[in-house]
Image: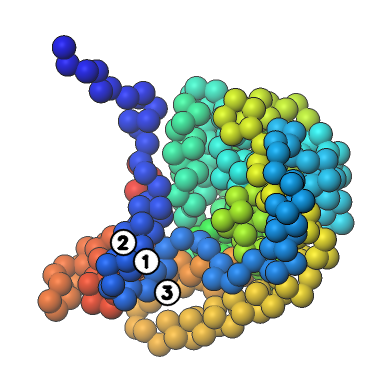
Amino acid sequence: MELDMSLNPRVNSLEPSKTAVIAEQATDLQQAGIPVISLTTGQPDFDTPSIIAKAGIRAIEGSCTKYTPIAGTAELRTAICHKLKEENGISYTPDEILVSNGAKQSIFQAVLAVCSPGDEVIIPAPYWVSYLDIARLADATPVILETNISQKFLLDPKQLVLMLNEKSRLLILCSPSNPTGSVYPRELLLQIAEIVASHPRLLVLSDEIYEHIIYAPAEHTSFAVLPNMWERTLTINGFSKTFAMTGWRLGYLAGPRHFVAACAKIQSQSTSCASSISQAAGVAALGLGKGGGKEVSDMVNAYKERRDFLIKSFKQLQGVKNSVPQGAFYLFLDFSSYYGLEAEGFGMIDGSESLCCYLLSKAQVISLPGGISPR
């Protein structure tokens, strides 16, 4: 008898995370002694601030190593509520907070909890690569709303209106954006909120993981603070980017109790609680003060210096277009003027993937293709 090796159709429909695949290739090359420069995973190159790391060490030494409640410790959820009230102007109670193993898990559970088969998830492009397949895992249909560089990669409310219908269930907004660094101004968010309010089934997943990595004069506005949007908004945030805590795996969802409880049910049957050690460190992180205090502002100042240097440098390259990022730590560059050209010793550059191959072969720089197919 031959073993049945078939897989769940949902799994067969997925693509591996492009970012993770390319990052692993970079690691393999580095371990083989090839001196590559990896511009792949969205990860700060700073160490976790020592006050946060020491809180984690104290948690280990103090035997804070047991399971916590599924939703997270009361101390951390209370601290998150205080942060959201003081920094974002949004009021939540601890039972409206769910702490998870990173913001990605928070997003996954939120989409799975609110979307039914056939529902549509509106995703402005360019987008973080995992949004698409997370929607598919929920048997929802991702619908791509294209933006363009001339509008700073911000969605056009008129185009949003044309896309929405009775199947529209979730609009995903990421501000500051991965991968463009665009920041949605309050005035535009108000227009979007007015459109959302006219569709009874439509919710908004507001991915705010980069909220404190932002460059003046841009300002962050949480979608849930807008008129009549609290009950429609699932706010996603975490500790990875702001506090350079990617390996600690700590994120959270804030939203109406009904939706948060549904996400907690999913988490209870998968990973259970987040690490007790990471949660103790998270309390210390939120204790640094508004926006992470000096520890975070120093990192943000360094990101801004790098951004300014790169923007100035790329302006000297003929045919390269960019929208100056107002937040996060990415540059989403338009090299399309080079497509169709023959590169000596390489061949035709016919798109973003072959351009990345060219950069790797000629300069040992590993980058991510921006023209990833909506498939």
Identify which residue is drawn at 65% across, 74% down.
299
Query: Which comes sooner in the sequence, label 1 or label 3?
Result: 3
Query: Mark 1 or mark 3, which is nearer to you?
Result: 1
Callouts 3 and 2 close, C-beta under 8 Å: no
Query: Which comes sooner in the sequence, label 2 or label 1?
Result: 2
Is disc 3 placed on a helix, strand or loop?
Answer: strand
Q: Position of residue 325 (x, y in %)?
A: 56, 70
* Residue 344 - label: none
Is disc 1 placed on a helix, strand or loop?
Answer: loop
Relative to 4, does residue 96 appear above or below in the rendering? below
Q: Is residue 167 left or right of residue 220?
A: left
Task: Please tell me which residue lies in front, 362 or 72.
Answer: 72
Amino acid tagged 3: Lys
Callouts 2 and 1 close, C-beta under 8 Å: no
Q: Quadrant of residue 291?
A: bottom right
Query: Which comes sooner in the sequence, label 3 or label 2?
Result: 2
Is disc 2 placed on a helix, strand or loop?
Answer: helix
Give the residue at mark 3: 321
Give the residue at mark 2: 28
Residue 171 visible here: no
Q: Position of residue 168 (x, y in %)?
A: 57, 31
Q: Is residue 317 left or right of residue 180?
A: left
- Between the residue at mark 1 and the residue at mark 3, the CA separation in whole angstroms equals 17 Å
Q: Which quadrant is the C terminus positioned in?
A: top left
Amino acid tagged 1: Ser
Task: Please tell me which residue lies in front, 279 or 239.
Answer: 279
Relative to 193, does residue 8 appear above or below in the rendering? above
Amino acid tagged 2: Asp
* Residue 367 - label: 1
Relative to 72, does residue 316 appear above or below in the rendering? below
Classify mark 2: residues with Cα within 10 Å, few (<14), some (14-19) or many (20+): few
Task: Please tell me which residue lies in front, 173 or 50.
Answer: 50
